[in-house]
């Protein structure tokens, strides 16, 4: 049995969420395994995020049990746990030699050198407040998931408005099965930036100063609270740039794959105590990196 939410590997999932919910998940899982026994990695990733997202959406309609992690805005629900259990258990059955790294605690070492990075519900605070700005996300990487040698696949699914993005090796990023056009260059001052900064960090100059200097370069600011959805917006050209500090692997890798799959640029810059991830077209990323590097020089 896979570890769920940091529990020991022999934890019965029915002790993590209710027996009734466990039975629902098993029904979905059995059907999924029968359908995807021969699926390639990209089709499997797409099926996993679509099914996990639909499961979470359905469970939200049935009513949620909410727990708090580090703050009132850092939450987890039974839907997160059940969806991650579904994804992790399906992967254990269909890709037993691959590793796992999940936001809610699913972990397995890789014998193949490949690891699936799982975010069952990205944007859980939005999810619990019945905003539809959330998704299920998944990435497949080669090597250490914290510093992969290759980002093989990214998949993101938004149940509402029923959109799925997939980046597979050697192919452009797809949205609902159709390739997205390549990103075109645009100056930061002509496009919007998607970003996030927790209110507590806005009182700390080491975070606020570099963040505000980058944001000031753009025409418009968007803070919506789901990194993978933001990065899908970069891939589509709805956002021109994206920046966030201390981003977890599961919040970064799926969307990063989508951006790179349309010729976008991604990167990172360390400023003082944290590392900022950036994404966008080549021109906006160059602007963000330049401003952040200047801020880093002032800190040092």
Image (tube, rainbow, N blue to C red):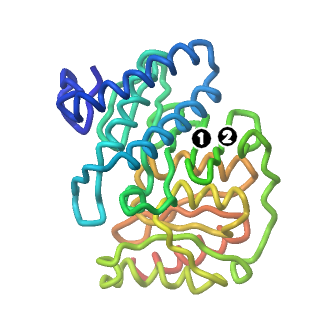
Mark seen at residue 167: 2
Which residue sits furthest front?
A: 62
Q: Helix, strand or loop at disc 2?
A: strand
Asked if the residue at tag 2 contacts the one at tag 1, i.e. Cβ–Cβ closer than 8 Å, the answer is: yes
In-front residue for pair 23/300:
23
Residue 146 visible from this viewpoint: no
Q: Residue 218 appears at what percent x and percent y?
A: 64, 82
Vertical arrangement, residue 293 with respect to residue 56, above or below: below
Q: Residue 100 appears at what percent x and percent y?
A: 40, 30
Residue that appears at 48% across and 60% down: 226
In-front residue for pair 233/248:
233
Between the C-alphas of marks 1 and 2, the distance is 5 Å
- Counting residues from the start of the chain, the first of labels 1 and 2 encountered is 1
Q: Residues within 10 Å of mark 1 (few under 14, many from 20)?
A: many
Is 144 placed left or right of 36 in the picture? left
Vertical arrangement, residue 98 with respect to residue 162, above or below: above
Mark seen at residue 154: 1
């Amino acid at each position: 049995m896979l570890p769920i939410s940091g529990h020991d590997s022999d934890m019965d999932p029915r002790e993590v969420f209710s027996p009734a919910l466990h039975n629902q998940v098993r029904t979905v899982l059995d059907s999924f395994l029968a359908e995807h026994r021969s699926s390639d990695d990209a089709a499997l990733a797409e099926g996993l995020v679509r099914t996990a997202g639909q499961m979470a959406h359905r469970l939200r309609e049935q009513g949620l049990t909410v727990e708090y992690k580090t703050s009132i805005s850092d939450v987890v629900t039974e839907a997160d746990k059940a969806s991650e259990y579904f994804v992790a258990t399906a992967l254990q059955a269909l890709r037993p030699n691959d590793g796992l790294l999940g936001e809610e605690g699913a972990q397995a070492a890789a014998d193949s050198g490949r690891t699936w990075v799982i975010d069952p519900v990205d944007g859980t605070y939005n999810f619990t407040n019945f905003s539809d700005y959330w998704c299920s996300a998944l990435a497949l990487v080669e090597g250490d998931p914290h510093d992969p040698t290759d980002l093989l696949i990214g998949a993101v699914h938004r149940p509402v408005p029923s959109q799925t993005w997939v980046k597979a090796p050697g192919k452009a990023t797809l949205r609902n099965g159709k390739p997205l056009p390549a990103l075109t260059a645009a100056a930061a001052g002509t496009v919007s930036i998607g970003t996030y900064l927790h209110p507590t960090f806005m009182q700390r100059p080491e975070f606020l100063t570099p963040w505000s200097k980058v944001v000031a370069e753009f025409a418009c600011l968007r803070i919506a609270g789901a990194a993978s959805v933001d990065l899908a917006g970069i891939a589509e050209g709805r956002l021109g740039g994206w920046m966030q500090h201390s981003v977890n692997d599961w919040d970064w890798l799926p969307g990063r794959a989508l951006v790179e799959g349309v010729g976008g640029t991604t990167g990172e810059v360390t400023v003082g105590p944290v590392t900022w991830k950036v994404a966008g077209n080549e021109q906006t990323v160059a602007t963000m990196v330049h401003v952040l590097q200047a801020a880093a020089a002032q800190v040092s």
